[in-house]
Image (cartoon, coloured by chain):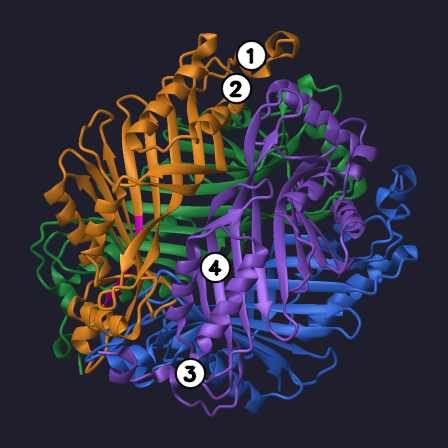
Chain colours: A green, B orange, C purple, D blue
Amino acid sequence: MTETTMLPDIQSQIDDRGVELDRVGISGLYYPLTIREKGGGQQTVTACVALNVGLAEQQRGAHLSNLVEALHRYREAAFDLDDLVGFVRDVRRNQDRRGYTFEKAEICIRFKYFLPRAAPSSGTVALVPYDCGFDVALNGQGFKSIVVGVPIATVCPCSLAISDFGAHNQRANVIVQLWQCLDDQHFLWFENIIDAVESCASSQVHSVLKRRDEKEVTERMFRAPRFVEDVVRDVVVSLRHDLNDVRYNVRCESLESIHAHNAYAEASGVC
Amino acid sequence: MTETTMLPDIQSQIDDRGVELDRVGISGLYYPLTIREKGGGQQTVTACVALNVGLAEQQRGAHLSNLVEALHRYREAAFDLDDLVGFVRDVRRNQDRRGYTFEKAEICIRFKYFLPRAAPSSGTVALVPYDCGFDVALNGQGFKSIVVGVPIATVCPCSLAISDFGAHNQRANVIVQLWQCLDDQHFLWFENIIDAVESCASSQVHSVLKRRDEKEVTERMFRAPRFVEDVVRDVVVSLRHDLNDVRYNVRCESLESIHAHNAYAEASGVC
Amino acid sequence: MTETTMLPDIQSQIDDRGVELDRVGISGLYYPLTIREKGGGQQTVTACVALNVGLAEQQRGAHLSNLVEALHRYREAAFDLDDLVGFVRDVRRNQDRRGYTFEKAEICIRFKYFLPRAAPSSGTVALVPYDCGFDVALNGQGFKSIVVGVPIATVCPCSLAISDFGAHNQRANVIVQLWQCLDDQHFLWFENIIDAVESCASSQVHSVLKRRDEKEVTERMFRAPRFVEDVVRDVVVSLRHDLNDVRYNVRCESLESIHAHNAYAEASGVC
Amino acid sequence: MTETTMLPDIQSQIDDRGVELDRVGISGLYYPLTIREKGGGQQTVTACVALNVGLAEQQRGAHLSNLVEALHRYREAAFDLDDLVGFVRDVRRNQDRRGYTFEKAEICIRFKYFLPRAAPSSGTVALVPYDCGFDVALNGQGFKSIVVGVPIATVCPCSLAISDFGAHNQRANVIVQLWQCLDDQHFLWFENIIDAVESCASSQVHSVLKRRDEKEVTERMFRAPRFVEDVVRDVVVSLRHDLNDVRYNVRCESLESIHAHNAYAEASGVC
């Protein structure tokens, strides 16, 4: 029995409502994937995936099982952002088998990505988790994009300046998303962007700090007080220095130690 | 003692990094607010608030305490979206006291909003929660916006057509965001948008259903099977019929009963 | 037509699997409720409710719509923990109409509860949110219980002692749950427990701090360094001093500024 | 320089508050770990870890960096629950170096664990994510424990019986936790418990279903209607049949398609 001849294909019915859909697909799909690391290794991650195609006015529905089948085959190889562009091109081509043209296809994946970090004095190494991801959109001009979420520590410059001793400080999260043209040859590694962000913080965070490390980190962060405004601006200055023809969005949200709410800053632009 | 003369004002320092910030402010602030209802009443909600101003290149930081103080005063009165536009204008004006021009100011608030829903046969009434919100941006042309999140039930048309009996169905969430010009005179009530969305579902959801209601809801939803694609398109058709000069984004995500992941559809446009 | 005669009642079928259920009911139900405040006022909150009954071996199912109907009627009046005990007793009695004995009935509600907090120097008042709740269980001996979640700031005593200047500090969350016998006459107010917790912190948090307040809060917290271990122990000492015949669980989780993970401490006992 | 001689050791100070702590440690630590699979393979997961020791009355604090260092070393090898018992024993022993006796040590880890599932008609294979975890407590008698979270589909027996056609159905989550004595020789595999739970559902869920699979799954689930009460009881009956001397807790929460809230059932016992 061939499936398409025996069972009605409701998704392929003609739709006359005159509404094109920007995205039709699946979301909240967890899948193990393997990411190429800058150093040449690879890392197995637990990714949350959204995978969508555009849908022309006249087609009622998309066959979503094809999207998951494609991802399942793809998971076997380690990949980077440029490989993922190829994957999304395949997805678009394969959805197209009934004569409908899917001009759009998009993937958005997010995962914890781990990097080893050495404590500054003892040199003890442990892993720090970063909230990373890739976005690819084939959609008009299209783009490829990486996103990194970097936990940092911030010491408040105002509190430090006005107080006789001490200053409030806290964990903050910096999110940097960078968009490139699909054929941009300059490869962006998570590792480089994460390093750049950490150098803009009062201090990077660590997973292990022995006492002499804690002393060094404490003193270091009090020598480098930063508002969320400062962190965002320093990251933008750093990106402008290092990159070309890249659109950026930089956000910093600090879990203020003296408030139950957060402080927030954001900047966007092209460098 | 006047505060500004005695303590250094780090935020007012001149900044020379050449980076304008799109948003500086507070996020994740929970506050009780009072919303005007369409019927003339009012409803106290627990809102999550983000309140930001733009920051010119040359100013180092914003005084965030002013933002929370403004919100605290504002919480005393019941408000609707147009009142909120007035509030954001006040915030922008008040941040502007040191000669810096804050062209941008934005608020984003989200809360559970409750409407009574009668069961279809017994008439038993209970409240259903909707994830609603307001966005206002003074920023270039600016906009005012409402968002509604509406839980619905969807019966799969494919499953219904191909199976000898039954069909998979599930809870789905529809999110509709509508943007208007700041001076648009046509007032958009949550209640109207929610009604419109519910009429596009296989069935609306209820908080109380007696057995005879459950029978009626079950049969009703099997008479109105809908893909997420159908729900989004029907909502768009309904919005296009009712509204003018409004930008819309409509999303539907269904918690597929036969999968651990979701089905998703989205459309955007202007009606 | 009376519902029970015309439609089959599947829930009332005899079950022969020999498995008694500890809890059957509804969860994740959002409802607006009104809580009595210590000062004599009342506060409308958005509560997340779980409401369950026990189910005897021989009954197949519970009629869950009754639970929501009961809550809907109950929401009209302001209540405190002792009123809620009465509500749960009513729920149990009303489920019992077909001759089955529901010995167990439980409610668990959680909500943001707001208290005004004055900044220490300027006296500026704003609201701080606390994650509060009530649990009642009629179940053998049964209990009534309140829970408070209190955001605080903690300065690390180790970092302060070993560093030449500064110390890492962060937001932390303290959760205190207290269980009493159902007929305990000593009434426990959220307000009192929250005050007790805040007095054990390096500093309480505020929603508005002017610059001179920020100076005072910073210096205050550096005079009162606290590990999570210290916070938990101080809260326990305070509870033991104030309460009698109350079972407690005290937890503190600090969002370490120098780590991406949290520090945690917990103690339980009876005072 | 040896760290302990040069820097003050605040954590090792004598505490005179008379409060023993049940748990002191770290929480919310994400780490990549490698789990042994039943089939002989291994799986790299992204785990969220809480690792705690008990703290005697007289000691002020615990040295948390040791806990993370131990985990970092441990991550290099694939492990199962019995290996994890060995790890926690090592952690307890190593914290004990200053003459304090840590009688208690506990670990709690949670992660997405993936199993291949074949569609019933086409045989197409894709991965389904399960929310799994291990708990080990050395604490008095102590225990070792596995937890599985299994997404399933449930068709409502009441809706099916009272409606002329159709029935509401939805995704539900079943959580089974099993506790054994530390020296219990009967090894519990995630795979077996997950299979047992899926056989108690109206249907298991899949990540890929072709149309003929969707037909089969739909019809299958309408032949096997289940309340949350039924699912929990069937799982308990299955556990009682298969296991000995194991304490269980079984919960089922269904994301009701006709409500915005969930239905819930729970049972506990020893088999």
Which residue bears the numbered disc 4?
A: C49
User: Which chain is indicated by disc 2?
Assistant: B
Residue type at mark 3? Arg
Which residue bears the numbered disc 1?
A: B13
Residue type at mark 4? Val
When the figure is inspected, residue C269 is found, relative to residue C257, above or below; the finding is below
Q: Choose mark 1 or mark 4, whichever is in front.
A: 4
Which residue bears the numbered disc 3?
A: C98
Mark 2 and mark 1: Cα distance apart in space: 8 Å
Mark 3 and mark 2: Cα distance apart in space: 67 Å
Of helix, strand and loop, which one carries label 3?
Answer: helix
Q: Choose mark 3 or mark 2, whichever is in front.
A: 3
Q: Which of C164 and C128 is in front in this view?
A: C128
Q: How crowded is mark 4: few (under 14 residues within 10 Å), some or many (20 or more)?
A: many
Image quadrant where one finds the C terminus of chain D:
bottom right
Q: Give the range drawn in magenta.
A: B149-155
User: Which chain is indicated by disc 3?
Assistant: C
Q: Nearer the viewer, residue A265 or B151?
A: B151
Q: Which of marks 4 and 3 is nearer the N terminus?
A: 4
Which residue bears the numbered disc 2?
A: B61
Mark 1 and mark 3: Cα distance apart in space: 74 Å
Q: Do labels 1 and 3 share a chain?
A: no
Q: Choose mark 1 or mark 3, whichever is in front.
A: 3
Q: Are marks 2 and 1 in contact (CB under 8 Å)?
A: yes
Q: Are marks 2 and 4 in contact (CB under 8 Å)?
A: no
Q: Are marks 4 and 3 on the same chain?
A: yes
